[in-house]
Every structure is written in structure tokens, then in C-alpha cells.
Image (cartoon, helix red, strand yellow):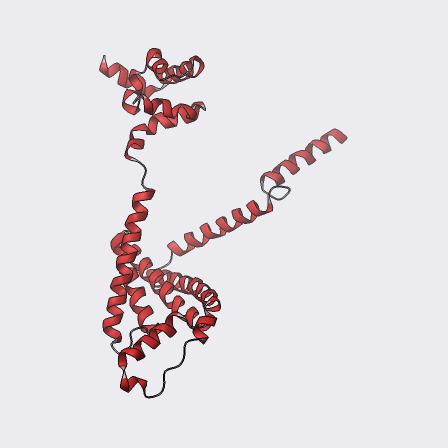
């Protein structure tokens, strides 16, 4: 009787441990809960209408931008206090100097000013990106550049960087933001894309991973043994790329049992 209860307790404790209720890393548990909450939020958001989704995404982006701007404003508060205020007659005497003063104040304002500027910039960017993605069904460089143009133009207008000719400077800032964002998007695509040669080793890598022999992937690549050569593999070919006897037997057995590879072998005979 006691052993039965003890067995039940062990099973319950195992279930609780598997669910993360007992033991485990608390940081990992917190991360798992956050990811679950984020997934539920995205699922709910995807079911909403376009105006609702755009409003929520814009508000979320603006909040994140405001926090970042407030932090930056705190760090640059000493710089903004050192910039002198222009005299009252300066706008009539030298408009370019007045515009320079406004740009310097916009870039080095206090926490509230920077929070406002960054909230507008990130909120507009997130909102336009959301609308473009919903309308076009994809997120590409064109959508990213359109969103960056809007955020750059609004940042110029709100921050006062435009000076006397705000419309022209808003367009200039928008184009600058769009070009920077487009370049970063293309750069990210270039570095995130897998190398061209890896496309030829998808099945080979999967086979080696399933067999626990992923360390020998470099041997396959060195011998140019890719997915197209799997049906032709022999013991001598594997020996030539310096794969030991044990792994060779496992690989050949897997190839012999794989129905797709066997079908290719039969079609070539």
C-alpha cells in the first residue's frame, strides 16, 4: 500500500517537473511563459481587423520607442543643457543658424523630448509595416523602405529638425531613413541566407543527424558527396573520405532501407 502511494507521488512529481512546476531553471520557466504569452498575443492579433491590428502595433511600437527615447534623453541631458538658447532676434537675422539650433536641440533634448520623438518614429514605422504586410501579404524591402520613409518624415516634423522649410526636410529625412533601412534589410538578407552549397546537402545533413553522425558532414562536403550522390554511395566512396567502418555501415544500412533512395536506384538500373 505504501509502495503504491509512493509510486503515485513519484508519477505526480514527474508530471509537475515536466510542466515546470517543480525544479528546473526559473529563468527558463519565465522565458517559456513569456514566449507562450507572446504567441497567444500574436495569434489574437492576427484574427483582428486591419485597423485594430494597426492601432495595437502602433501603440506597442510607440511605447517601446518612448522608453528607449527616455533612456537616451537621460544620458544626453547634460549635453542639451549646455546648448545655449538663441536670442529673440536670431530668427530674423540668420534663419540657417536658427535651424541649426533647433536641430541640435532636437537631437540632444531631455528625456520627455526624446521619448516623444522616438515614440513617433517607432510607432509610425511599426504601424506602416503592419499595414503594408497585411495588404501585400509579405514583408520585403519595399514595405520596409515605405515604413522607414514615413517614420523619418514624421520624426523630422515632430522633432523640429526641419527648420524653416519643414516639408522639404521631412521628405529628405524620409528618403534618408528609407535608404538606410533598405540597405540594412538587404544586408540582413545576405547574411541570414544559407550558403548555396548547403542546399545540396539537405537530405545528407538530415540523414547524418538522424544517425548521430553529424560530425562527418565535413567529410561528405570534402568529397563532394551531396544529396544527388546518396543513391550511388558505396563502402569504398565512404572510405575515400575517411569515414570509419562503424559509421560507414550505419550510413549504408540507412541508404539501403530508405524507400526514396531505393526507388531512385531502381530507376537508374
Q: Quadrant of residue 108?
A: bottom left
Left/right placement of residue 89 relative to residue 84 reads: left
Q: How many marks are shown on the rendered structure?
A: 0
- Residue 173 pos. (x, y %): 27, 66
Outermost residue, bottom side: 89
Q: Quadrant of the C terminus?
A: top left
- Residue 78 pos. (x, y %): 47, 71
From the viewer's perspective, is residue 254 above or below residue 156?
above
- Residue 165 pos. (x, y %): 24, 76
From the viewer's perspective, is residue 238 above or below residue 70?
above
Q: Quadrant of the N terminus?
A: top right
Task: Tell which of 253 and 45 is nearer to you.
Answer: 253
Specify whether residue 233 is in view. Answer: yes
Left/right placement of residue 215 relative to residue 189 reads: right
Residue drawn at point x = 41 percent, y = 76 percent = 83
Q: Quadrant of residue 219?
A: top left
- Residue 56 pos. (x, y %): 40, 62
From the viewer's perspective, is residue 211 above or below residue 141?
above
Residue drawn at point x = 23 percent, y = 15 percent = 268
Residue drawn at point x = 46 percent, y = 52 percent = 38
Residue drawn at point x = 27 percent, y = 70 percent = 170
Specify whether residue 111 is in view. Answer: no
From the viewer's perspective, is residue 132 above or below residue 12?
below
Amino acid at each position: 500500500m505504501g509502495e503504491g502511494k509512493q509510486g503515485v507521488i513519484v508519477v505526480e512529481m514527474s508530471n509537475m517537473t515536466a510542466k515546470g512546476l517543480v525544479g528546473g531553471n526559473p529563468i527558463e520557466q519565465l522565458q517559456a511563459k513569456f514566449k507562450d504569452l507572446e504567441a497567444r498575443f500574436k495569434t489574437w492579433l492576427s484574427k483582428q481587423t486591419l485597423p485594430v491590428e494597426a492601432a495595437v502595433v502602433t501603440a506597442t511600437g510607440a511605447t517601446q520607442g518612448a522608453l528607449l527615447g527616455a533612456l537616451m534623453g537621460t544620458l544626453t541631458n547634460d549635453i542639451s543643457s549646455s546648448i545655449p538658447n538663441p536670442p529673440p532676434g536670431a530668427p530674423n537675422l540668420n534663419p540657417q543658424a536658427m535651424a541649426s539650433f533647433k536641430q541640435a536641440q532636437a537631437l540632444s533634448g531631455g528625456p520627455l523630448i526624446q521619448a516623444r520623438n522616438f515614440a513617433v518614429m517607432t510607432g509610425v514605422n511599426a504601424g506602416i509595416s503592419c499595414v503594408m504586410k497585411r495588404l501585400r501579404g509579405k514583408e520585403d524591402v519595399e514595405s520596409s523602405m515605405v515604413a522607414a520613409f514615413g517614420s523619418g518624415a514624421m520624426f523630422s516634423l515632430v522633432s523640429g529638425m526641419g527648420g524653416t522649410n519643414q516639408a522639404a526636410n521631412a521628405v529628405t529625412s524620409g528618403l534618408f531613413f528609407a535608404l538606410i533601412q533598405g540597405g540594412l534589410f538587404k544586408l540582413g538578407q545576405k547574411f541570414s541566407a544559407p550558403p548555396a552549397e548547403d542546399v545540396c546537402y539537405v537530405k545528407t545533413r538530415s540523414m547524418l543527424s538522424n544517425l548521430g553522425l553529424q560530425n562527418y558532414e565535413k567529410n561528405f562536403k570534402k568529397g563532394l558527396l551531396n544529396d544527388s550522390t546518396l543513391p550511388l554511395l558505396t563502402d569504398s566512396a565512404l572510405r575515400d573520405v575517411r569515414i570509419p567502418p562503424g559509421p560507414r555501415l550505419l550510413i549504408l544500412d540507412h541508404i539501403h532501407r530508405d524507400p526514396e533512395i531505393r526507388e531512385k536506384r531502381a530507376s537508374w538500373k
